[in-house]
Image (cartoon, helix red, strand yellow):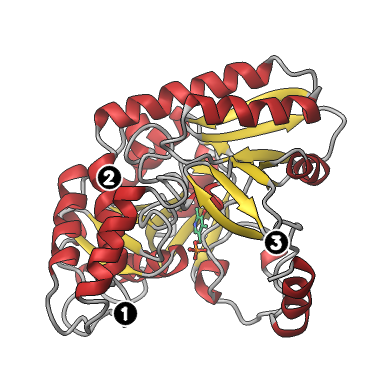
Amino acid sequence: MKKEDIFEYDKNYIAGTYLRSKLFAKSGKGALCRDEEGKEYVDFSSGIGVNSLGFCDSRWVEAVCTQASKLQHISNLYYTEPQAKLAKELCHKTFAEKVFFSNSGAEANEAMIKAARKYSFDKYGTGRNKIIALINSFHGRTVTTLSATGQEVFHKFFDPFTPGFEFVEAGDIEGLKEAVKSGDVCGIMLEFIQGEGGVVELSEDFAAAVSELCEKNDILLLDDEVQTGVGRTGRFLCCEHYGIEPDLASLAKGLGGGLPIGALLLGKKCRDTFTPGSHGSTFGGNPVSCAGALEVINRTDDSFMAEVEKKGDYIRTELMKLPKVKKVTGKGLMIGISLIDLSSKEAAEKCLEKGVIVLTAKEKLRLLPPLNISFEEINKGLSGLKEVLS
Ligand SMILES: *Cc1c(COP(=O)(O)O)cnc(C)c1O
């Protein structure tokens, strides 16, 4: 199709929720993709951290196609092998003892909030249901995950929001202690690196204080790893960098390698919190999505993680040489770039013109390249960035 026609169809028939950039993507392989006219782009975005293995990785395609031709879906009232295997792998790789599958990050977070409230209800009865979240967080677009999101711009239009959420500033240990004094808090919810909030890392001290406070008061630590999880930061879960074990963690973006899937990891305290009928999802844990996720999980072993870290370090070092780069944040292949004399929006548009797909996060550029990007592809992308940031 001609891009003018796609543009017209989109304008006339798709709800206007996205301010799209003019890239009409047609096909891709690895970290490279082509538009409708054959122009090539280096992808430093992976969707938004979704295509962990890049575009159309051949083993991933095979796993997905094989499963699609065998059994594409059956209700969660029945058993399937891909779902069972994926759950076992996730439990082996993490603190989790059980897994609940959803389709997206927001849904995984909904499940996380429900699990925290039910754990507390089962043990302490009604009324102990408050969740403390952080200012500048992002937890999703459903009414409840918006309610848990600590950015005022998201708290418009959709009143009434779900009650039971309070916010403290990341780093404000005293404020946090004050907030839990009421005795009605069941969970503290956070991202170890705030993604949409601008690739902002929690300090080690604050993270340790949260963990300690949670442990002392039987408050659950709710770890949103929707963006940071599945190897993005050079560890399978970002909490590993901090030496902290959460009670619950949500995964989504990178888990399926490009297919919709989310997962809630339930630790020891919550392994039996969900009982028949207490939660569910029609599509959650779809066999095709699970087959894709299994390929991602099987590939993200320790040596793969070490490569992610090495590539992240290399990109950071190269970026710091560029005149318009003020500061680089994040871990592994989750990279935030503060700019000098250039807005992030403007820089991202210019990068696209130069054939490099990058993301923004507030006033920063954000890079989330495929985890298996090659050094050749990295250098190709960096040379585009050099033109914009010099
Ligand atoms: C993207 C994101 C979400 C929402 O995920 P969806 O799949 O878009 O619902 C939640 N939390 C974090 C940290 C995210 O980055």
What percent of the width, then of the height, locates residue 275? 17, 77
Rendered-image quadrant of the C terminus? top right
Query: What residue lies at 80% left-to-right and 41% top-to-bottom?
Result: 350
Front residue of 252 and 167: 252
- Quadrant hosting residue 111: bottom left
* Residues tagged 3 and 2 counted as in contact (Cβ below 8 A): no
Secondary structure of the residue carrying tag 2 is: helix
Is label 2's Cβ within 8 Å of ligand 1?
no
Is the residue 377 above or below the residue 130 in the image? above
* Residues tagged 2 and 1 counted as in contact (Cβ below 8 A): no
Is label 3's Cβ within 8 Å of ligand 1?
no
What percent of the width, then of the height, locates residue 209? 40, 36
Give residue 215's mark.
Answer: 2
Lateral position of residue 71 relative to residue 289, left or right: left
Distance Cα–Cα, label 1 vs label 3: 30 Å
Q: Which residue is mark 3?
A: 152
Q: Earlier in the sequence, mark 1 or mark 3?
A: 3
Is the residue 363 above or below the residue 378 in the image? below
Front residue of 59 and 110: 59
Q: Which residue is mark 1?
A: 281
What percent of the width, then of the height, locates residue 196? 60, 50
